Amino acid sequence: MNDDDDVGFPESSSAAEAADSYLVGFVLANIVGLRYYSGAVSGRELVGLVREPLNPFDPNAIKVLNTRSIQVGHIERTVAAALAPLLDSRVVSAEGIVPKPPKSSNSFRLACQIHLFARLDAFEVVRAAVAEGGMQLFDVSDPEFGLSEAAVVKERGGKSARKVDEIFAFVGRDEGKITPAEPPKEVILSELFDHQREGLGWLVGRENSCELPPFWEEKDGGFVNVLTNYKTHERPNPLRGGIFADDMGLGKTLTLLSLIATSSRYPVRRYATEISGGSVEGKMRSCSATTSRSSKKVGNSRKRQKLDDDGGENEDVSGSKTTLIVCPPSVISSWITQLEEHTRPGSLKVYLYHGVRTRDEEELMKYDIVFTTYSTLSADFGYSYPPIQKIKWYRVILDEAHVIKNFAAQQTKAVIALKAERRWVVTGTPIQNSSFDLFPHMAFLRFEPFSIKNYWLSLVQRPLDQGSKSGLSRLQALLGAISLRRTKTAQNGKGNLVALPPKIVETYFVDLSAEERERYDVMESEAQNTVREYMNADTVLHNYSTVLHIILRLRQICNDVALCPSDITSLLPSNHLEDVSKNPELLKKLASLVEDGDDFDCPVCLSPPTKTVITCCAHIFCQNCILRTLKRHNSCCPICRHLLSKSDLFLAPEMQSSDDDECKSLLSNRPISSKVSTLLKLLLESKKQDPSTKSVVFSQFKKMLILLEQPLKDAGFCILRLDGSMSMKKRFEVINEFSRVGPDAPTVLLGSLRAAGAGINLTAASRVYLLEPWWNPGVEEQAMDRVHRIGQQKEVRVVRLIVSGSIEERILELQERKKRLATGAFGRKAAKEQKQMCVEDLRIMMRL
């Protein structure tokens, strides 16, 4: 089901649903209303099924899309009435297949097989609902089950798996050596490394390609997609873009600046002012030249415009070669630094679309580069058609694109809606949780048919999740066709790809003191008993927030007992179904989960909650996210399915942010924790070897960073702090200050993983300390490679501090699963992907 309101859960996203879902059977239905829509189906073809709960004529409506995402019609009312409640409650997911072409173009209806997938324990519920709706379910016991056109059925019978795999293998074959390219010297001042020149050649080659997109062939005077069997007489647009997934620290930013410079048609401008002091906004403006730009049109004809990404809408402002770069706020400073360092002043005109910003499209198109953030796009999306959505950009680059791993998030929808001729996904960690992280990238790239969830689930995700041998090879072939990934260590055994000093990663196990161990063991024992009760009663999801809170506190006590309350029972509700409506204390405790846990995300948008709302069933969301879900038919909590209305939502009370004085009071008259003591010991040893050595200490808990400040100052270290509460200007100043050298220069940077763990350059340091493990190993890799990247002159030592015999050790086990998946997806050796099982992961973490 390709549902615009689909909700992704932490460790329970559509990927996990696919892993646990199996084919129940299929029902026959008609697609009706064909004459009212322009979408066509030309042969045996998969179609997308999308719930329309807000349809004014039928709240059960299920619309049907073809492979180009154009509506064909609707599923007939009687079938939709039976399936809609199952889809809305996520009991089933559905895939549609038109088994044969229509007899004539004037048909008013079209036969369709709807395949239903569900968890094994929900099979009887599905069968009963189908029977009650007056339909016949063709399952494996039915003689006519073999008539199914679904790939999962044909592969079971050995009929089509080989053909599909052969198609993937052909598309994913190696296209040969990349031809390196040189950037224009009048814009790019720096010499590129060999791998950067090759990267530039690959980027330019894809942008200028006139080839058919992958999986398309010219046949019988038309064009056919060999995977979906969709036929058209209109030549599909080339896929001018892809995934640039080089390892962190290999200089992707300079390579992309070279691409922007290479595509510029305009003469070099003589600059008016060099980038100098002031705010980030000031630096952006002072980077701009005062000369005006040509408004000459780009493109060959109106025919070219007709093939636009937006389906032919030509009201956009076009004609410029402006590149839109979307990135997190902390990354903008890195782009500014790269512009200062590598480009001729004034050669590229830059604008920051963030904060106070223009609403004039023509003004934006005067610049070579427009920077914006994912949060700015999300805030603008849906409001009076903002200029950034109206413009058809020459190029859109998504930097740190793993940010849009949730297809249902507002910022992901805003990104996908952008109009562009060329589209680039840029990230050193494209897979963080599961292969489903890649689906939003396919949607942004408009890579048909994988930009439609039905196709992604059927052809890639489900085979992967259910252990099919073809799953990983298909994913590898797919990525091989549209991505470029090089790692710092060459894969051919000939040494490193780029001459960087070595990076040594070691795990330092910390033993808790007797007092800390006793405290931890008591809390873990209470936590185990509580979680075991939830599991036995099958109420883990009903107590989702409490489980998260328990895990958070166990992790915090590993750092310092001052971070969490003395007993875990103070966190627990009085009954299994948490009800905050009459429990203001529980409301405050849940609000503190967001305040204390830097890694807590809204389950809908997978971002830190804004305007935090807590439901009566004690689950935490952004206000806008949960209100959008309530618009759906049969509104219920996305976590536990408890029925909800607006009266069941409670705004979280304002929590007083931790400040220095509060944390100092926590530390007064008590010893330093074992982990802090270990960190101090390691820092002092490093300082003794070389007093000028700079170190970065990462933690996901802001309060922990504050707690560290006084002990480090007392030990003689000059420190800085960088966390998510700081403005963009302040972050920029901190990064610049940390790079300063001299006897009074700062030597330790205390960094939040969210604010300092991605997209910035910290090569002034050569030591990295990770105070606690993160769920996603990709986030840790990002943090390490803020230091280990091009420009680093010293050996980099990374130390992960892990408390022995604690939940931290078990988190390392979960990390290893995800590392194997991420490595296998871009590799050529098939390695079976581990299933994501939320409850099983919880068992591991809680040692049950």
Image (tube, helix red, strand yellow):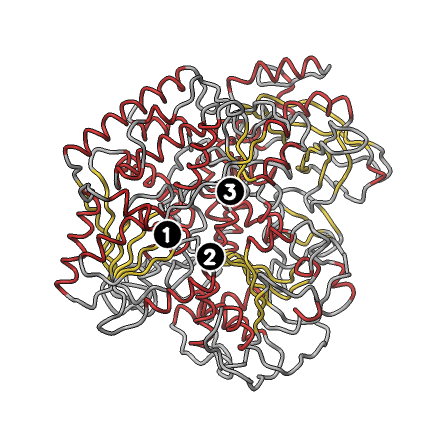
Q: Quadrant of residue 534?
A: top left
The crowding category of the residue bearing disc 3, from other C-alpha atoms within 10 Å (few below 14, some 14 to 19, many at least 20), is: many
Give the CA distance from mark 2 to mark 1.
40 Å
Residue at image mark 3: 609
Residue drawn at (54%, 67%), measured in percent from left and top?
205
Residue drawn at (68%, 71%), measured in percent from left and top?
363
For the residues carrying marks 2 and 3, which lies nearer the camera in this image?
3
Q: In this rendering, would 192 be left or right of 148?
A: left
Q: Is residue 601 above or below residue 685?
A: above
Give the CA distance from mark 3 to mark 1.
17 Å
Residue at image mark 1: 752
Residue at image mark 2: 174
Q: Amino acid at mark 2?
A: Asp
Q: Name the quarter where the N terminus is drawn.
A: top right
Q: Is residue 189 above or below residue 214?
A: below
Residue drawn at (13%, 58%), measured in percent from left and top?
685
Q: Is residue 472 above or below residue 647?
A: below
The crowding category of the residue bearing disc 1, from other C-alpha atoms within 10 Å (few below 14, some 14 to 19, many at least 20), is: many
